[in-house]
Amino acid sequence: MKIIAMIPARYSASRFPGKLMKDLGGKPVIVRTYEAAVNANLFDEVYVVTDSEVIYCAIEKIGGKVLMSQKEHECGSDRIAEAVEDLAVDIVVNVQGDEPFIDTTSLSKLIEVFKTDTQKEIDLASLKVKMTNEEDIQNPNNVKVITDRNEFAIYFSRSVIPYHRDKEVAINYYKHKGVYAFRKEALIDFYHTPMTPIEAAEKIECIRYLEVGKKIKMIETSVESIGIDTPEDLERALKQLANEK
């Protein structure tokens, strides 16, 4: 199997414009992320795919592999699909551009899913993290996921799922982490399928996969990586970087 990493990198961001080009210890955030993905030694190739000349030039400057999006896209899956449609690959791993501290253990688990799936029953794999804080559980910014007994996703929602009507029943709540590994065929099918009404209502792209019958294997992880969505997150990332030196 040929396994590649794709890092979707939009320049604009509503909460923190230009965040991927912010300085993180002498290098832009997106460069830190790219180098961490390469150094993870999990992928045959690592690409950044972007809509920004500034980001394109930053990756090109360090000799990295970078592709320019030709279209406007609603989500990262669409941006990646456009980039890989003509590439000879089997598995595509979506690495978040704003998470420069790569969680290699969790990514290894995602890749292993496909190495052991000899019947090719799994279309994509993703991560979930247990939540215990009630504020986190109620927060609509945290996408929740419920799974069947074989850890295949049943549904994703910004609402609290499952609804805990019977308080005597013990329930765990899980947050979906937006890190994916796809079979190329599933990704291309997604790309050529219009956005579904439920996906549009919830603003959760993986719902489209479920609505068209794709099987999503969920892997539990305990690692909460630093995603840079605000200036405060950048400060936290700078402190972590200093601690790693």
Image (tube, helix red, strand yellow):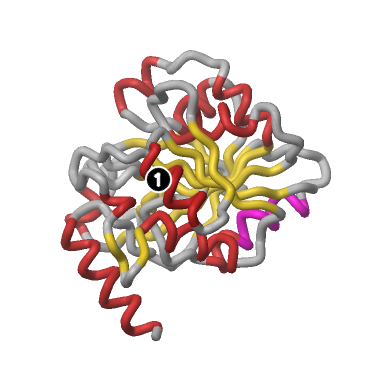
- Where is mark 1, residue-wise? 55
Q: Which residues are magenta?
A: 108-116
Q: Amino acid at mark 1?
A: Ile
Q: Say whether residue 43 is left or right of residue 105.
A: right
The outermost residue toward the right is: 118
Question: x, y (%) of residue 151?
Answer: 57, 48
Q: What residue is at 54 percent from the left and 44 percent from the top?
A: 66
Q: Nearer the viewer, residue 74 or 62?
A: 62
**Helix, strand or loop status at disc 1:** helix
Few, some or many residues within 10 Å of mark 1 (<14, 14–19, 20+): many
Quarter of image, res 223: bottom left
Question: x, y (%) of residue 184?
Answer: 68, 34
- For the C terminus, which image quadrant? bottom left
Q: Nearer the viewer, residue 56 or 216?
A: 56
127 in the magenta segment: no
Q: Is residue 70 visible?
A: yes
Q: Is residue 149 visible?
A: no
Q: Say whether residue 1 is left or right of residue 112.
A: right
| Dominant SS in magenta | helix
Q: What residue is at 32 percent from the left and 40 percent from the top?
A: 11
Q: Is residue 42 above or below residue 238?
A: above
Q: Nearer the viewer, residue 26 or 18?
A: 26
Quarter of image, res 241: bottom left
114 in the magenta segment: yes
Quarter of image, res 24: bottom left
Q: What residue is at 34 percent from the left and 36 percent from the top?
A: 157
Q: Is residue 103 above or below residue 12?
A: below
Q: Say whether residue 2 is left or right of residue 159.
A: right
Question: x, y (%) of residue 150?
Answer: 62, 48
